[in-house]
Image: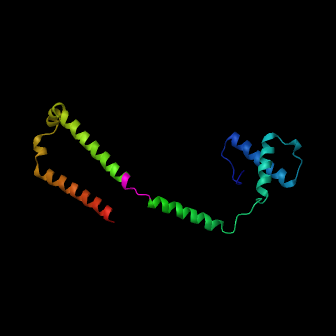
Amino acid sequence: MTTHTRPPDNDAAEREWQAQEQAIERERHGLDPATDDARVLRYRVLARALRQPPEQALPADFAQRVARQVELSAASRASADPGFERYLQRFLVAVLMVGAIVVVAGHASEWLPSFSAAVPMTVLTNPWLLAFACCIGLSQGIAQWQRRVH
């Protein structure tokens, strides 16, 4: 049913809007449904159902029950040991790293000449670049360690 906001500029949405509004009005005034089309009849059923109070009231402690179920569900998820998944993930990352090293080392004779032609060896042996790479690696390692500790 509508929330009394206009639909977008669309013919189909406008027809639905009009059918909903007509059904609400006809149901509110108790007019005969014999002249209504099928779409308006369906919306009249909805309008009638929404106007009637629920057949069965919620229990007085409904909110407490739901909150208790949510707490139990959250506690059961928190108590589940994620250790296995964490170790499995670390194992798979290690396997992928070993596989990458094997592939790189196995095909080094193919790509290393083109790499050394593109990057002069003086760049790779520059002590300042080595110091820069060590600083970046060290700062990333410390950041990871701090996230783990806190």
Q: Is residue 8 depicted above or below 106 in this figure?
A: below
Q: Quadrant of residue 82?
A: bottom left
Residue projecting furthest to the top: 110
**Quadrant placement of the C terminus:** bottom left
Please report the residue visible at 87 percent of the width from the left and 54 percent of the height from the top: 29
Q: Is residue 84 left or right of residue 37?
A: left
Q: Residue at x 17, y 36 (%)?
A: 115
Question: Can residue 148 be found in the magenta stretch?
Answer: no
Q: Residue sitting at 82 percent across and 52 percent down?
A: 25
Of residue 36 and residue 13, the one placed in the foreground of this image is 36
In this view, the residue in front, 130 or 85, is 85
| Picture residue at 25% right of the left edge, 57% below the top | 141
60 to 137, vertically: above or below: below
Q: Magenta stretch: give its range.
A: 80-84
Residue 116: quadrant of the picture: top left
Residue 94 rendering spot, x and y as whole percentages? 27, 46
Left-right relation of 125 to 73: left
Percent x, y for residue 28?
Answer: 84, 55
Q: How many labels does the image show?
A: 0
Q: Which colour scheme is used?
A: rainbow
Magenta stretch holds residue 83: yes
Residue 79: % across, % down: 44, 61
Is 147 or 64 nearer to us in this picture?
A: 64
Dominant secondary structure (helix, strand or loop) of the stretch shown in magenta: loop
Q: Report x, y in % for residue 136.
A: 22, 55
Query: Looking at the rendering, which quadrant does residue 132 occupy?
Result: bottom left
